[in-house]
Image (spheres, rainbow, N blue to C red):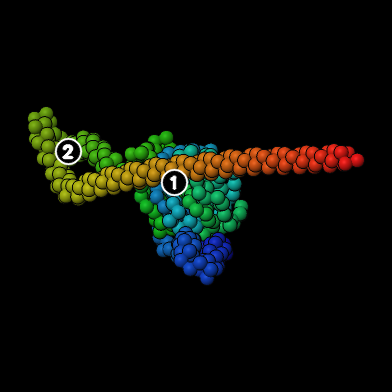
Amino acid sequence: MNRYYPHTIIAQEGWTFIIGGAVVSVIIMLLGGWWSLPFWLATLFMLNFFRDPARNIPEAPDAILSPADGRVVVVEKAIDPYRNVETLKISVFMNVFDVHSQRAPAKGKITDVRYTAGSKINASLDKASSENERNAILMTTTSGRDITFVQIAGLVARRILCYVNKGDSLVRGERYGFIRFGSRVDVYLPLDASPNVAIGDKVRATETILAFLPLEQDPNFDPSKVQIENKHSTSPAARLKADKIEQSQRLSSENDLDEQIRARVAAQFQQENPTAHSGSIAKEEWEVAARLAKIQAERQAERQAETPERERIIAAAAAEEEAVRQRLAQEQAEQAAKQEQARIQAEQTAKAEAQRIAAEQARIQAEQAAKAEAERIAQEQARIQAEQAAKAEAERIAQEQARIQAEQAAKAEAERIAAEQA
């Protein structure tokens, strides 16, 4: 427990999400039973994401610790953009299943904290260091060495949390920040630091040593002579190649040493035999050759003693390289299978959607046709009814006219009869 992080098991940033998820899950469970399962799974994911376990801290005073859990994606010589000096850059990428609290890689005082707004591209990409939202912490260690570690937001991460300010002090392994839902941390070290990890290595915050940084810089140190393996060539095969180069350089230096020993032995012989004349040259050469042969035999014995260990290292590197190659091939095959499955599912979804749209259009057309037919029938019935009404009205009028004519005829007949009677 420390002044910046009061919780050691679950990060304080997660309690809102965890409690909120649990409350929603209980409510859904009471209302819908099994419908609450996805909400419980989401709550368990939050519980796992915001875990913040205690870690063992290495005691090596010159060790620079990993500030975060994750996978190493960069080990290279690069410019520290906050100090504008050439440095050793080591980057750690965190996926959503890693612990996302950040812990101090060294003990020292914070000289500056710089926040930079930016985009939200994939944090595993190189350009994330310069384009994404980020928060840089500049520290001077207790031994006076300057280091920089940067919190970088990722594709899913939406918020960077930092709990230290300029002038604060941190001890190694102390929690100083948190990044939600996937991110990256860049560490910039002086060039005389020796990297202890390679690209692809899994690291754990405070427990994994990223590099060893001398407590004091050698006054004869020349930064221009520093050679750091390219970020794409730190595989086991590259390490084996580096071992072979180192071995050849060592053999070359041993040959140079042989020449130096030859000269030193000859000088020693001359010093021990100042009265030696030209007639003793053969003896001198024999003495020099004998001493040199003895030294070379001793060195050859040492090299032969180192051979089994070298062969074991080479075999282990080859086995590791093969394992990495197989793992990458398997991951590529799994990725291809997932992409193919996603493509098939997308096609099936699109086909089902097209069928649904076609069925919906057919239904609408059928409804429109039925409606039109009903309107036509109604109009036809109205026309027939109108015709029938008109016909009935005509018949009624004809009957009325016939009645009137009959009445008129009867009246005329009555008048005629009355006239005749008169």
Amino acid carrying mark 2 in the image = Phe
How many numbered markers are drawn? 2
Question: Does 1 appear above or below 141?
Answer: below
> Which disc is residue 383 wearing?
none
Which residue is outermost to the front?
A: 421
Give the number of the mark in front: 2 or 1. 1
Report whether 273 appears left or right of 399: left
As measured in the structure, the alpha-carbon distance from the residue carrying label 2 to the one carrying label 1 is 57 Å
Residue drawn at 15 percent across, 42 percent down: 296
Quarter holding the C terminus?
top right
Task: Give the crowd class for mark 1: few <14, some 14-19, many >=20 residues within 10 Å.
Answer: many
| Residue hosting label 2 | 269
Front in this rendered view, residue 197 or 153:
153
Q: Earlier in the sequence, mark 2 or mark 1?
A: 1
In the picture, the disc for residue 91 is 1
Identify which residue, 112 or 22, lies in the foreground.
22
Give the side of residue 214 with respect to residue 266, left or right.
right
Q: Between 387 and 171, which is closer to the camera in this rendering?
A: 387
